[in-house]
Amino acid sequence: MKSLRNLLSRRMARFVEKAVLPPPHQSIVTFSFDDCPRSAIQTALPMLEAEDWRATIYVACGLCDTTNHLGLHMSLEDVVAVHSSGHEIADHTYSHLNTIDVSLKTFLADIKKNQKTLKNLGLPPSRHFAYPFGEVSPALKQALRTRFATLRGVISPNNPSQDANLLNAMRLYSDDTIEAAIAQISELTETPQWLHLFTHDVRDMPSQYGCTPENFARVVSAVKASGALVLTVDQAFQKLQQRETIS
């Protein structure tokens, strides 16, 4: 019964507190990484930097210097270095909490703890957030919509529209989602859209939530061939906001 309620809550969240963004004139691609696996900065970020592209990392600071199914996570010093290299540091709660396991008050306090940790590192407040595990409810969506400029989920896009309070995102996982992502990238020349791509670890033997360096390189090549702009979440959001102002 609880799992059914959670499923219904996630589905309801798609239709409430929506903030539909204007479509871009030119397709935009954003690369992002959830949590903070060190393999992402060792393997994936150099591939993006070689193209003069930057990514968004949704960091859960409580995972820093720990090891789990995603491998070793980056240190707090790594987070600072990544930011100094021009990548965006976004929020993913401090403890990587699942909203279905804790109260809304506890969840919001954990976000505040993550922001405080980033501030203590000398980093600016995160303007963007990703729901851990993709779990979202109408109440959480409402609570966060004024705290962050965008809130990202894990729902694959089925149309070019983007809800700033529940951004669609395409998985780059070790299963067949790589082929689906490349197919989606090939459509960028036909319909201008903001395509958000995300993964976790990037290594030779990735978790089920990550991908291999070879597959990540294939995606990078496909994006380059598409001619789309590659922007961080904040850069893309600001560009779309500018279009809305002009319109």
Image (spheres, helix red, strand yellow):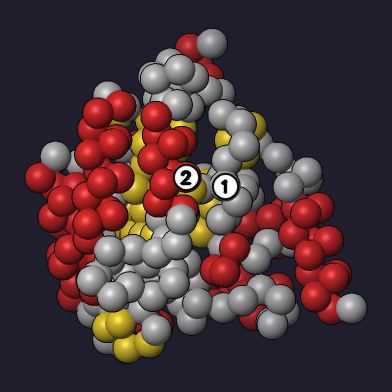
Quarter the N terminus occupies: bottom right
Q: How crowded is the residue under tag 1: few (<14 C-alpha within 10 Å), some, or many (20+)?
A: some
Can you say whether 72 is above or below 50 in the image? below
Residue 212: quarter of image: bottom left
In this rendering, position of residue 12 left or right of residue 175: right
Residue 221 image label = none
**Front-most of residues 154 and 150:** 154
Q: Residue furthest right?
A: 1
Q: Residue at x 22, y 50 (%)?
A: 217
Residue 180 image label = 2
Q: Residue at x 22, y 57 (%)?
A: 214
**Which residue is the site of mark 1?**
156
**Three-letter amino acid code at the position of disc 2:** Ala
Q: Secondary structure at mark 1?
A: loop
In this rendering, position of residue 243 left or right of residue 140: left
Residue 79: quarter of image: bottom left
Residue 2 percent across, percent down from the top left: 84, 78
